[in-house]
Amino acid sequence: MDERKSVIRELKDKNRADSEAMDRLFENLGESLFQRIGEEEPFSGNEGEGPGGLLAEFRKLHSEIAESRDIIKSLEGDIQRLKELETEITGKEGEQTRLENEFDEVNVNLGKALLENAGSDDPLKPQEESLIIKVDELEKKQAELEGKEGGIFAWIGKNAQMAVSKGLILKNKFALQRLYRSAGENFIASGQEDPLEGETGKAAEKARELKEQLSSLAVSLAMLKGERRNMGDLFGAEGSPARRIQGQEKHIVHIQGLFPGVYRRFGSLASESRMSEDFSPFFIEEDRQIMERADMLLSQIEDRDLNIGKINAAISIDEEKAEIEKIRKAIIGQKQKIAAAEEAIEGLEKQIAESETRIDELDSFIKQSGGM
């Protein structure tokens, strides 16, 4: 193997290392210069690969990151608000259930008190009396069944009757409770302002208070659920907040990956334009040392590239010489083949001449013999 190719590989490895070192120098230089420039506008034009264009590109990348972070913050706020809404709704629904139960209990007590003081013309009074009578009769029958004795079959029959009796008692008591509740609710719904005395008045006042609380709570719940529904619709239209946050985070990582390239290009341009009045106000002594180091690395890279070119040229010359020698040998071989072919042709031509002479002799013999 040609050792010169090994030398080329070594030179290329050194160039690669120096090129990476030079890129790091330009990257650090560019980043430092961007920080020093800050919000200033020292360059004319804001497009292309000029200093103004690179500064605009740098600021645009920062703007995109800030925008993505604002979106993430907003989405995180939406998620937090949705959690708060769920907690508030759950709490208020629990409070609503508690108040409804309390309201039912107060209405039952109110209705019972109202019917106790109601006249016979009240349409609910006969229903109350009928249910009370049924409950009393069923409870008396239940007591009789409990005191009844007998054999195993009588005991089985008694238990079956008691189960039915208990069911009927509960059913009628529930109907009575429902009647009282309905009476209380009707009274509160009628909006009567006539003051009631004693426990009945307290029950009525408590029922009105609970009704107002339930009404206010229902409005609050409706607003919270409406807000939750609107947020759900928005999330449904624009996609999952968690997935959108993930997308924005990936976008930020992508944008951050573009900064080193912008820093390198800006640092390289600054080094090339170090005498420019636009850049000079932002340079410090350390920058000049960095640029000198970059110049040295670039010079080394160029020298190695030149050496690589020379070695490649020498290798190419040797390859061309080898090819020429190969062709020359091929030419000699072909000439030898031509000489051999010419000699063979000469022998064949001689055979033709001998054959033609023989033919002439035979023709002459025929003519001399008087023909055929």
Image (spheres, rainbow, N blue to C red):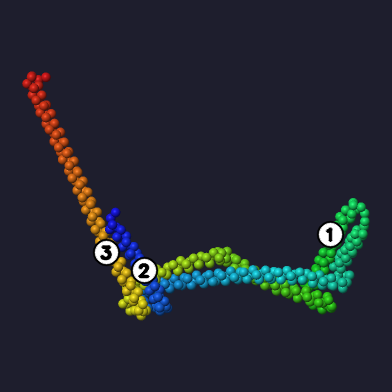
Position of residue 157 relative to residue 42, above or below, is above
**3 vs 72, nearest the viewer:** 3
Q: Is residue 332 left or right of residue 243?
A: left
Q: Mark 3 points at which residue?
A: 306
**212 vs 355, nearest the viewer:** 355
Contact? badges 2 and 1 (CB < 8 Å): no
**Amino acid at the residue labelled 2:** Ala
**Amino acid at the residue labelled 3:** Leu
Q: Is residue 341 left or right of residue 206?
A: left
The spot of residue 2 in percent (x, y) is 28, 55
| Mark 1 or mark 3, earlier in chain | 1
Task: Classify 10 Å Cα crowding around label 3: few (below 14), some (14-19), many (20 and above).
Answer: few
Task: Classify 10 Å Cα crowding around label 1: few (below 14), some (14-19), many (20 and above).
Answer: few
Q: Mark 2 points at which residue?
A: 21
The spot of residue 54 in percent (x, y) is 38, 72
What label does residue 167 carry, if any?
Answer: 1
Note whether residue 222 is visible: no
